[in-house]
Amino acid sequence: MVNLERLITPKKLKVYLLSAGHLVHDIYTGFLSPVLPLLIEKFSLTYTLAAFLRLAMRIPSIFNPFIGHIADVVGLKYFVALAPAITAIAMSLIGKAPNYWSIVILLIVAGLSSSFFHVPAPVILKRISDRKLGMSMSCFQIGGEFSRAIGPIIVVGAISLWGFAGIYRLMPLGIVISIVLLLKLKDEKIPRHRSKKYNFKKSITKTLKQGKMLIFALLGILLIKSFTASVIAAFLPTYLSFKGYSLLMAGGALSILQAAAIIGVLLSGTISDIIGRRRLLIIVSFCSPLAMLLFLIGVKQAFIPVVILLGLISFSSTSVVLALIQEKNFKYPSIANGIYMTINFLLSSFIVLFFGKLADMFGMEKAFLISRICSFLGLPLVFCIPKVDENCRSCG
């Protein structure tokens, strides 16, 4: 009974609720990769145009630092609450889109909504978390990773039942979770910067100066992740469809990948509380390109095991990075998180676009090989991670 009370404290309930919101929100943003083969066939798209759709969803992330600025000034808990509903509506209408550019518009709307969720959410999470911030961030990130595990199954199942145009029937879940978040977060008090001297230019300049070395390190981590995890997540169903697998099998493989990522995220956040964020991120950064190589070698002989291994390793850095940013104690934490999100979303999207161009030029398999080689470019930057956590195991 005592253990149960510790597990379900009021603060932890809000952590679980935010994680559930992350889960539901990202279920919808995860629709794009599984339906990409259908969009390619329906509109006769090149791989480059297909990859641009992912970039379209990430274009609003350019405004993430400004969104972080607004969050620090006025608070964005209501935007966090409403985002799942907006994203659900936009992504559920893709099946009814009459042309390529209408899909682009829907994805931009979903991307803007996603930014208003992801930028302030970790700041709120830090406010309501107990001491084990790494564990809380893992719980939050598991919501996102689990969504990408079940999202492909949900959308492929919906297509099987109602056809591609019928996936609009999936939008009520997002609306319901938004209502719950509105009710539970409305009384949560998030600190704000009310000083008249607080302006966007000064705050972002100070944040960049304060976290210069950390940002260099994050750039390296994200280069590695983008050339491995991002291209796999974007093109695995398309690659398997090209190889002759059914849409159901291709979507199922993506679900297996993301299910393994859930375990990786849970383990990485928890382990980083013990051995330190820096040490764990260095280990993961070395192992991700190797996991990508095993995927390319073993995709035929040991398909499921290599997909699981890739999911375990390549996606596991996110929760640790989020904890690292919040523990830096930036004066403007939402802006710091916004800068990270901008780099993350844009870098991964442009690299996926670059991968699409490579696939058009050389074929999918050679594009994966080139991507793996390019991932090594980020390794030297990883060592720029500040050594602030090595003597503080309990705080990460």
Image: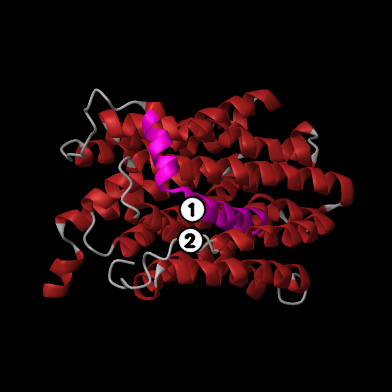
Tell me if mark 2 has few (under 14), some (14-19) or many (20+) residues whose alpha carbon lies within 10 angstroms of its own.
Answer: many
Quarter the N terminus occupies:
bottom left
Marks 2 and 1: CB-CB under 8 Å? yes
The numbered disc on residue 213 is 1
Judging by the rendered image, the residue that carries numbered circle 2 is 385
Corner quadrant of residue 57: top right
Q: Where residue 299 sits: x, y (%)?
A: 74, 69
The numbered disc on residue 129 is none
Give the left or right position of residue 269, taking residue 237 as reference. left
Quarter the C terminus occupies:
bottom left
By what rule are the colours in the image chosen?
secondary structure
Q: Which residues are magenta?
A: 202-228
Q: Which comes sooner in the sequence, label 2 or label 1?
A: 1
| Separation (CA) of disc 2 from disc 1 | 7 Å
Magenta stretch containing residue 383, yes or no?
A: no
- Name which residue type carries label 2: Ile
Corner quadrant of residue 289: bottom right
